[in-house]
Image (cartoon, rainbow, N blue to C red):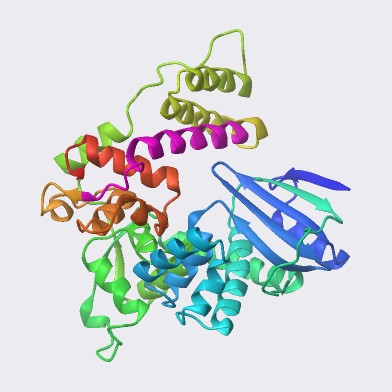
Amino acid sequence: MSLTGTLDTMPVQELIDWMAKKKSTGILTFKRAGVAKTMTIESGCVINAASTDAREYLGQFLINFGVVTEDQLQKAFETQLETKVLLGRILVMTGLATEEQIHRILELKIRESFLDVFLWDYGNFNFQDGIVPDEPSVVQVSVGLDGLHREGLSRKEFYQEIRAAIPDNACHFACHQSAVPADLDPRSANAVILQLAGKNFSAADIILRFHSLDFPILKNLYEMVKRGWLAVTEPTPTTDVEIEVAEILEPDTIASVGDETHSGPDRYLMAAQESMKKRDYDQAIGILKRGLVDHPYDPDLCEGLEIAESGLVDSLRNEMLSDRCVPYLLRDDLLAISSKWTPAQRYILSRIDGQRNLRSIIMVSPLKEVEALKTFRVLIKAGYVALR
């Protein structure tokens, strides 16, 4: 049996409550523009969670919780490519993590990936009842749906409080150092967050620096705002550098979409298909994203976006990754000359040291591969970064 719907007709809390009481077994998928999550359920417990959001990969959680560094993760990935051994097993074999740490992080990964859906304001879901994976998970992890349901309701309510104080991830902060306890551990997450906020980093910037999903960092920021350590500030005025980059990043290439013979989602699909025939994947992605604003639940538009992004990734890989090029900055003051790089641009610029090759930076990045590659392309075309 298959159950399909949208989160506005059957909210996630109702779906999970029903599945928990039924002790369901099967494959549960959530989708919204650009993100797909697949949960394996067995007897009312989640035993595996996969996502196309790069921040939900195991490696990102390991970095976020200080189990490994970016460089250590990169070396582990290189070993994985050569040996085909699972990442967690490689980390245990090389002594970088214990089995207990991997188990704990995998359980946390399931919880955070699942609870994140409670914060979605729209999306599709599909549940394939009775379907189980052909091969069992190597690491046995199990998180009950009943507990996730209770925690999800609590998180959704708390998230509304957070958003009342921090309306969106573009918010910046002023640091009131006099209100910060003198004994705050400088190595703690809160100390690092305060340091980044003091450098005029937005919430989105800080989230990327921690290789984190939104909620954990927003929770810390909100608590610091309540304590008076931070205050939400007005956005910093746009600089000339930002305007120059933004114009390259978001060109107004779509004057009109489709033709009058098509309406609704088909109008966008047909126009996107024409762009993809010309291998203009950027324009196809722009068209499909516009279509999803008008028709957020349309599965064909979602699938089309996945195809267009895959085509762009292949194109950019061939263009920039074939020779394992090393990026380097063409100006030493790049991070200082613009106070409002996009979070993706700021993250990428901060990782360019003239030593790491482009592939390794992307491999451990919390950005989706297509976003990381597009960001590199923008910075190269703008004349701020070069490859050698």
Q: Position of residue 70 (x, y in %)?
A: 36, 67
Looking at the rendering, the stretch of residues picked out in magenta corresponds to 302-327
Residue at 58 percent across and 79 percent down: it is: 104
Q: Indicate whether 266 appears above or below 166.
A: above
Q: Do we see residue 303 in this rendering?
A: yes
Q: Main secondary structure of the magenta part?
A: helix
Residue 113 in the image: state x and y as whole percent. 59, 62
Task: Please identify the quarter of the rendering in which residue 69 is found.
Answer: bottom left
The quadrant where residue 86 appears: bottom right
Residue found at x 87% / y 56%: 130
Residue 181, position as x, y percentages in the image? 28, 87
Determine the residue located farthest toward the left in the rendered image.
332
Q: Position of residue 294 (x, y in %)?
A: 56, 30
Whether residue 370 is situated above or below residue 73 in the rendered picture: above
- Residue 320 is inside the magenta segment: yes
144 or 106: nearer the viewer: 106
> Is 75 drawn above or below residue 377 in the view shown?
below
Q: Residue at x 36, y 40 (%)?
A: 374
Side of 99 relative to 79 (left or right): right
In this view, the residue in front, 237 or 276, is 276
For image coordinates 54% across by 81% down, the residue present is: 101
In the orientation shown, which residue stands out farthest toward the front?
A: 82
Mark yes or no: residue 229 visible. no
- Pick the quarter of the image with the C terminus: top left
Instruction: Determine whether, in the image, residue 374 is placed left or right of residue 33.
Output: left
Q: Is residue 137 magenta?
A: no
